[in-house]
Image (cartoon, rainbow, N blue to C red):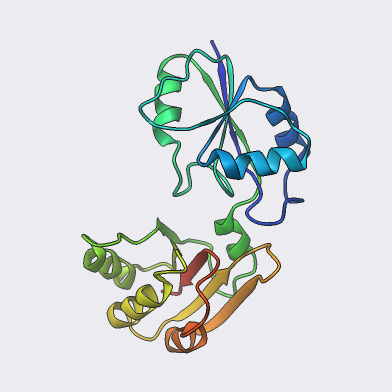
Amino acid sequence: MGTLYIVATPIGNLKDITLRALEILKSVDVILAEDTRVTRKLLSHYGIKKQVLRYIDSRDFERFENIALVTDAGTPGISDPGRRLVENLFKKGFKIIPIPGPSALSALISVSDIDLRGFLFLGFPPHKKGRRTFFKRVAQSETPVVLFESPHRILRTLKELQASAGERWVNVGRELTKLHEEVFRGKLSEALAHFEGEKERGEFVVIIDA
């Protein structure tokens, strides 16, 4: 049958792409993207001319033999679309091949001062329903917890973390691999003071110690 490649792309610095990823993007029949505009900028940077379609769960892509799935930044499937595509095409006989590379999750873990020999990854907190349960789970975890957050909700999330989990040691990564990359290490109260009033920019990765 066909092959689906899960291709990791840079989370900021365009040089953080593997030679194998570039080879795959050049060779496939079609590239499925979270946002075609973002993906076309990457392809243009490397002189790759390829059909790019927006990935939507309800669309049927099995007519293509060789497919690459990319997200806007990082590794598909980590709090990004892709699971259903993998599931559907696997059932239809496609080979599923990972093309590993950048991830904001592993980038922050690699420079963390928290013991992460074991950890719980929870992705993005719910926007509304389920937030109390989410933060209760963080507070009760016996291992460090890693989560993602947007610049528009980071202060709210830090406040709710402090209210539910108390004064914990945290690492907060923002705009990893980009020009204004920042890794904050300190207590939750210090993180709140540090990011209070700052311009809303950059995606966040937060590690909360147990």
Residue 76 percent across, percent down from the top left: 52, 42
Residue 59, position as x, y percentages in the image? 40, 24
Image quadrant in which the C terminus is located: bottom left
Number of numbered callouts drawn = 0
Q: Residue at x 64, y 41 (%)?
A: 100
128 left or right of 147 in image = left
Residue at (38% x, 86% y) in the render:
167
- Closer-to-camera residue (182/106): 182
Q: Residue furthest top?
A: 1
Along the viewing direction, whichever of 202 and 208 lies nearer the viewer: 202
Q: Quadrant of residue 175?
A: bottom right
Residue under the image location 51 percent in, 66 percent down: 204
**Horizontal and vertical percent position of residue 138:** 33, 68
Q: Residue at x 44, y 49 (%)?
A: 79
Find residue 88 and report its horizontal and vertical position in percent: 40, 23
Q: Is residue 160 left or right of residue 116?
A: left
Residue nearer the viewer, 50 or 6? 50
